[in-house]
Amino acid sequence: MVLKLEEKKEGAGGEHGHHGSEEPCGGSELKKDEETGTSGPLPRVLSSARTAPSTAAMATDGAGRVPDTAAPKKNLLTFDTEEDVAVALAKYTAELSEKFAAERGAFTVVLSGGTLIETLRKLAEPPYLGTVDWSKWHVFLVDERVVRKDHVDSNYKLAVDGLLSKVPIPTGQVYAINDALSAEGAAADYETVLKQLVKNGVLAMSTATGFPRFDLMLLGMGPDGHIASLFPGHPLLNENQKWVTHIMDSPKPPPQRITFTFPVIKSSAYVAMVVTGPGEAGTVKKALSSEKTFPLLPVEMAILQDGEFTWFTDKAAVSML
């Protein structure tokens, strides 16, 4: 993989951004957005060019396949602080909301748990609170702990308390698990809900993969490189038929969970991987290294089939690069 450093001339929002001449990496600066009147930090952009890796650097995914080297590029946006990441992430999300609401009449958003919800806090503030068409949002969880919705471990509760209760998304367009079911039953039920939304035209399907195509996944990762509830070395990394599956032995408690599978994650139109602070710096280094080593981390296996994958990081998260 060949890496080149570019300066991003506009904020982090938008589909691709516009890039200027190359120059050394420096701190962020601010530019006022003409439409919203808001200012946002300008990151430095690290883009991985789509060149085939050497034979020595090639690695397989969890199913023993060599990842598609023609997959769309991944972008790395690095900001000075977590606050700057939050500002840019809100702008990026709001612009994609406007894009898909206009194109499809719906915006399907997938959230993870953890610190991501806190980093999305700017969406519940002006200007986005009043300018985003929240009625078009349909919100899903990339994984969930099989606990009551009001349990402290519930990702649904985390998302509601931290963001969803503060913005006017219709209640019926936030999709929680059925907490009265077993892990297996809850996973099957959630997949049934997704299939019905495909029939209704709310959720798109990927023509490339045959799996649902969510407009935007907003994800975090663990220090071990896990995303959703797909953990290093776990057999679920190889699941390639189900849309949603269950796990009974999560290495991170609580052990019983449901999770989207890799084919669904890889079918996304856009993925934002949000990592802030020094806790995952070593994992970020491995994930973004041009020299791939076995075994691949789950976050390294998230190669989109026909989409755009963007890292949103602060300086602490990339301190080991």
Image (spheres, grey):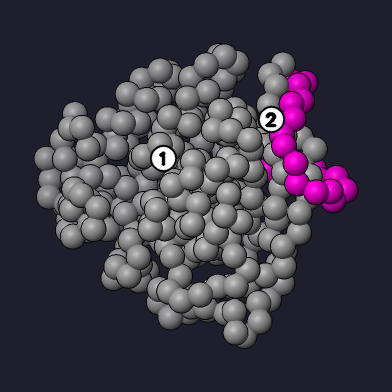
**x and y percent of residue 97 in the render?**
57, 32
Residue 42 sits inside the magenta stretch: no
Q: Nearer the viewer, mark 2 or mark 1?
A: 2
Q: Is residue 84 above or below residue 77?
A: above
Q: Is residue 216 left or right of residue 321?
A: left
Q: Which residue is mark 2?
A: 41
Q: Is residue 25 a member of the stretch shown in magenta?
A: yes
Residue at the right extreme, as displayed = 21
Q: Bounds of the magenta span?
A: 14-36
What is the CA distance from the residue labelled 2 to the residue labelled 1?
23 Å
Could you tell whether 155 is left or right of 281 in the image? left
Q: Is the N terminus in the top left, top right, bottom left or bottom right quadrant? A: bottom right
SS under mark 1: strand
Amino acid type at mark 1: Leu
Position in image of residue 305 (x %, y %): 56, 63
Residue 142 versus residue 10: which sits nearer the camera?
Answer: 10
What's under tag 2, amino acid-wise? Pro
Q: Can the viewer see residue 102?
A: no
Q: Which residue is mark 1?
A: 111
| Quadrant hosting residue 157 | top left
